[in-house]
Image: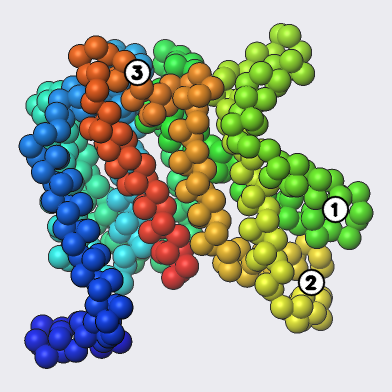
Amino acid sequence: MYPLSYNPSNTLIWLKKNLFSNWFNSVLTIVSLVFLYWFSTGLISWIFSQAQWEVVSSNLRLFFVGQYPIKLLWRTWTSLAIIISILGLSWGVFNTQKPLFNKISLTILALLAVICTWLAIPISIISSLKLLGILLLFIITGLIGKNLTYAVPNLNNWLSLIWGITFFFVLGILQGAFFLRPVRLDDFSGLILTVFVAITSIVLSFPFGVLLALGRQSDLPIIRWLSIAYIELIRGLPLIGILFMAQVMLPLILPQEMRIQRVIRAIAGFTLFSSAYLAENVRGGLQSVPKGQNEAAKALGLNSFFLLILVVLPQALKAVIPSIVGQFISLFKDTSLLAIVGLVDLLGISQSILANPKFIGRYGEVYIFVAAIYWVFCYSMSLLSRQLERK
């Protein structure tokens, strides 16, 4: 393939070789261009001339925090500031060898500033200033992270621990720890419920899936067959069925005095379902490790535990990072099923908004906005997986 450059002759050569190499490719290229032109012009025309975005701007608080108590919204702002700070720190740590501010990053930051202003102004000027302040905090912590890396060379090895501590600290703020007014998990709704269920399910399902993959390859027959039975049983059931069983059946098998909140039951369902698929992904990575690695480790005197932890798992997990992250992305999108089992997640809030007589018929605007939120989170996970593969 010829590189696309500003030289007209090279551009014409590239177009002829890749898009107009024969009559069939030429027809396919022309038809595709016509279709893209028709679709994009129609979509742009609808977005800027026909769509009524008031349904989004008037309900931003519901989309993001749902029915969270209004008097306690300072907790959500504080939690967002903490998360963005750690995200900026990670951005600076991972870009030690590259400039933080280039054309791409500056364009993204400028776009985020415009989006923050556009989103928050319909609510209040103060909210817009808060979002811009949080964006500035992201830039500052990014610079701090980059400078800290020179003083602490192994800081990137501590990021996972920092994120873990941040998760529990933010959850404590939102739920009412540290002598604050308590808020039940079942009172979470909107985007914060979606993110909380997704993150918790991902964190819990990963080690469980690894253990199932190891159990399926165990030399002990009872462990191997129990692991196989669990994986095949769960993979043969639909996720919505598992969620309904977690909501209905789990309280029946527990003591009457033990009442588990519905959010915890949903997390249990997602964890049980996702771990079975993760186990198969990890098993593929375990099978990709050459047997010579095991023999070499045993020759060095490593026992089975250190052989697994230091030699096999690092190579196996690295080989299946794309499939594991793909499963995590699928799990994040599957949280939209929470609306079916009575929990008001991001999609459930959207349905509640559309039930308002003032916004009846505004399906396109609401679902495009919700789809954009899902895309941002899923694409961010994809970018993170590529960063992990390079590291």
Q: Quadrant of residue 372?
A: top left
Q: What label sits on residue 386 in the rendered view?
A: none
What number of labels is visible?
Answer: 3
**Of the two numbered discs 1 and 2 in the rendering, the one whose residue sits closer to the viewer:** 1
Label 2 or label 3, whichever comes before in sequence order: 2
Residue 176 in the figure: left or right of residue 46: right
Foreground residue among 145 and 7: 7
Q: Identify the image quadrant of the C terminus.
A: bottom left
Q: What label sits on residue 302 in the rendered view?
A: 2
Could you classify mark 3 by the number of other residues whose Cα lies within 10 Å: few (under 14), some (14-19), or many (20 or more)? few
Q: Position of residue 257 (x, y in %)?
A: 71, 9
Kind of residue at badge 1:
Arg
For label 1, the residue is: 224
Could you classify mark 1 by the number of other residues whose Cα lies within 10 Å: few (under 14), some (14-19), or many (20 or more)? some
Q: Quadrant of residue 387?
A: bottom left
Contact flag, marks 1 and 3 (Cβ < 8 Å): no
Contact flag, marks 1 and 2 (Cβ < 8 Å): no
Gap between marks 1 and 2, in whole Å? 23 Å
* Residue with the most extreme right position: 221
Q: Identify the image quadrant of the N terminus.
A: bottom left
Instruction: Please determine whether, in this image, residue 325 is positioned above or below residue 274.
Output: below
Q: Position of residue 144 (x, y in %)?
A: 27, 55
Residue at screen point 53% across, 37% down: 200
Foreground residue among 96 and 201: 201
**Of the two numbered discs 2 and 3 in the rendering, the one whose residue sits closer to the viewer:** 3
Label 1 or label 2, whichever comes before in sequence order: 1
For label 3, the residue is: 352
Kind of residue at badge 2:
Leu
Kind of residue at badge 3:
Ser
Foreground residue among 92 and 56: 56
Residue at screen point 60% across, 36% down: 239
